[in-house]
Image (cartoon, rainbow, N blue to C red):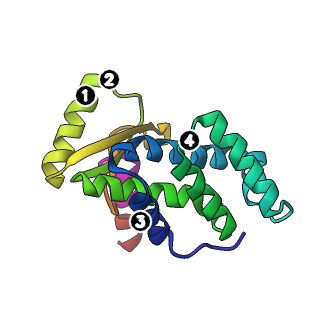
Amino acid sequence: MKKVKGIKKYARQFIKGVEQDRLESAISAISAIASKMETDKKFRSMLAAPVFNDSEKSKVIDVLSADMKLSDKTAAYIKYVSEIKAISALPEISRAIQDIYLEMNNKVRAVVTTAVPVATSLRDEMALSISKITGKAVDAEFAVDPSLLGGVTVKVGSKMYDSSIKGQLGLLKDKLIKG
C-alpha cells in the first residue's frame, strides 16, 4: 500500500468535526478501529483493499458503526477517510489524533518499557517523575520487554531516556569498538 500524506491534517479535521464533549469517546472508537486494523489482516483488507469498491466498504463501515455504536460524525469520518483512499493510514491518523488531544489538554504520552511488569504504586511514581521532567501531565503506557535485562526505557514524544542494562551494554560496546 502506498504511503498516505497529510496524517496530521486528517487528525485535525477529525478533532474539529467532533463536539468537545464527545471527543474522548470518539477518539476511543477511532483507536479501537485502528487497533483492530493493526491486529486483524482480514479486517484491514475489508477496509483498505482496492478489490472492494466504495459501496462495499461503506456497507462494512455501516455495520461496524452500528456494532460499535459510533456517533454519526465518527462513522462519517471513517467513510470520508475510506473514500479518499487514506483508510490504510487510520492507525497513524489515530495516533496523531491522540497526540493532538493530549497537547490540547497539556499532556504528553510516555511509553515506559521495563524488563519485568511494574507494580501499580511504582507506575504512579514513575508517571509523576516523568511529569516533573516534562512539566506536563503524563498519559503513561507501560510495556514489558525482557530483552532489556533490567532498568527502564522511557519514550516521551521523540525523546528517549534509556537506563536499561541492554542500553548501557550497547554504549559500552560502542566505546570498545571506537577504542
Who's the residue at 55% across and 48% down the image? Answer: 72
Q: Residues within 10 Å of mark 2 (few under 14, many from 20)?
A: few
Who's the residue at 43% across and 43% down the image? Answer: 148
Q: Residues within 10 Å of mark 3 (few under 14, many from 20)?
A: some
Q: Which residue is mark 2?
A: 119
Q: Which residue is mark 4?
A: 70
Which stretch did the figure color magenta?
A: 163-171
Q: Secondary structure at mark 3?
A: helix
Q: CA distance from mark 2 to mark 3?
A: 36 Å
Q: Secondary structure at mark 1?
A: helix
119 to 24, vertically: above or below: above
Query: Residue 150: horizontal and vertical position, in percent?
Result: 37, 37
Q: Residues within 10 Å of mark 4 (few under 14, many from 20)?
A: some
Quarter containing the N terminus? bottom right
The amino acid marked with disc number 1 is: Leu
In-image side of 173 versus 37 (left or right): left
110 to 173, vertically: above or below: above
Q: Answer whether residue 162 is visible to the viewer in this image.
A: no
N-terminal of the pair, mark 1 or mark 3, is 3
Q: CA distance from mark 4 to mark 3?
A: 19 Å
Query: Residue 77: horizontal and vertical position, in percent?
Result: 56, 58
The front one of 161 and 67 is 67
The amino acid marked with disc number 4 is: Leu
Q: Residue 168 got which mark?
A: none
Which of the two marks, 4 or 2, is nearer to us in this view? 4
Query: Residue 141: horizontal and vertical position, in percent?
Result: 38, 40
Who's the residue at 44% across and 69% down the image? Answer: 8
Q: Which residue is mark 1?
A: 122
Q: Which residue is mark 3?
A: 12
